[in-house]
Image: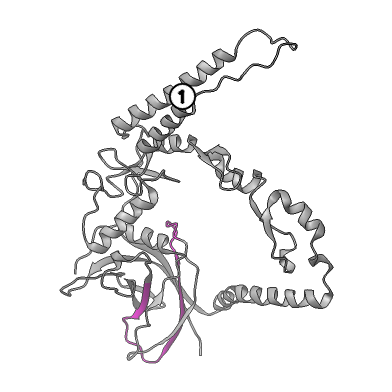
Amino acid sequence: MSSLEERDGVAAPGSSSAGMGVGAVGAAVEAVAGIAAMQEEVGIRREGPEPDPDEPPKKRVRVPDGESGKLEERLYSVLCCTVCIDLPKASVYQCSNGHLMCAGCFIHLLADSRLKEEQATCPNCRCEISKNLCCRNLAVEKAVSELPTECAYCTKQFPRSSLERHQKEDCQDRVTQCKYKRIGCPWKGPFQELPAHESECSHPTKTGTELMGILGDMDQSHRRDMQLYNSIFGLLCYEKIGFTEVQFRPYRTDDFITRLYYETPRFTVLNQTWVLKARVNDSERNPNLSCKRTLSFQLILKSKVNSALECSFLLLKGPYDDVRIKPVIHHHSFCNDANETEYVPLPISDSVECNKLLAAKNINLRLFIFQVQK
């Protein structure tokens, strides 16, 4: 077993357009210049003397839809991701030859290469890609944010940069809920119909008995959410508490078909020596073929103890990572005959977060251990 390279950062170019492909820049500039020329032509046509109010109305001058549509299609084809063939929604990365990849596809390619123990390559030109070799293309990100797109609710056209705000705050057709949903109203509908519904909603007139039943269900859900926080506050009252930063490093098994697993160097907490191990999809044979990816881990006590060591432990995200982990408290009684916990799931939100961890050179987390006093 040999340790792989340590984690590296995302390279940020000094100039956002320096790494852009020559073809992409030329086509984008030509298309933008064409749009500006058409807008100038329309402005010239509309200029002139003040119209006579007695004259009959004249027909409006319109730009042919075909020309504008062709320009947009050309921009879409130039700026789309080479993997999913769709316009990027967030960050845009490029290989050394200028081929573009959206952030999701880029991370997925790096995660697949880690699982298959191969060097990640650009799907277009097959040059090597990594977080050091690739950089963000800010010029393309800006160009994509200005392209028009259709609102899913009102079907009007908006720049991509302002679409999210429009759909959340301004669109009159966006889906919204009744303000009495907390007392059981299930209504969902267009925002413009909300005032009419709330004026006729029957839930404010419910009897006290009906409302008590609804509030009881809400209290039960709230108690489940608070149970974790109360447990953590209780653990913080323990006399012996230890925590440390842990770094999971990738390794390969010695089997004929090697499998990826992670292990931390030995570390000391509460005057005991420990090790953490992690595996992908519970050591599934080909996790790279699965769309759903998970990580599970176990805590191992390496020191010899004279008596049972009862502990509670949990993993949280490290101080320099942006992975989202929902803390879960685990309990185990360690002794010389039972020095390993069972593999328990790492509580990350979804497969996207798992791909982020797999794409990194190392996984950095923070471990807390609480020793239960007898």
Q: Is residue 48 above or below residue 80?
A: above
Whether residue 31 is visible, yes or no, is yes
Q: Residue at x 41, y 43 (%)?
A: 87
Q: Is residue 249 magenta?
A: no
User: Is the residue marked by circle 1 packed among few (<14), some (14-19), or many (20+) residues within 10 Å?
Assistant: some
User: Residue 134, how many percent across, how many down?
Assistant: 30, 44
Q: Which residues are magenta?
A: 296-323
Q: What element does badge 1 sit on?
A: helix
Whether residue 7 is visible, yes or no, is no
In the rendered picture of this protein, how many numbered marks are placed on residues? Answer: 1
User: Residue 311, how many percent across, how many down?
Assistant: 45, 83
Q: Residue at x 68, y 9 (%)?
A: 50
- Asked which quadrant contains residue 25, the reply is top left
Kind of residue indicated by mark 1: Ile
Residue occupying the far left of the picture: 256
Q: Is residue 169 above or below residue 237?
A: above
Judging depth in this view, the residue of 53 and 211 nearest the camera is: 53
Judging depth in this view, the residue of 162 and 80 nearest the camera is: 80
Judging depth in this view, the residue of 370 and 288 nearest the camera is: 288
User: Residue 15, how many percent across, how many down?
Assistant: 36, 33
User: Residue 84, how many percent across, how many down?
Assistant: 35, 49
Residue on which disc 1 sits: 35
- Asked which quadrant contains residue 1, the reply is bottom left
Q: Is residue 38 above or below residue 213?
A: above
Q: Is residue 28 above or below residue 189?
A: above
On screen, residue 370 versus residue 276, left or right, reads right
On screen, residue 2 versus residue 142, left or right, reads left
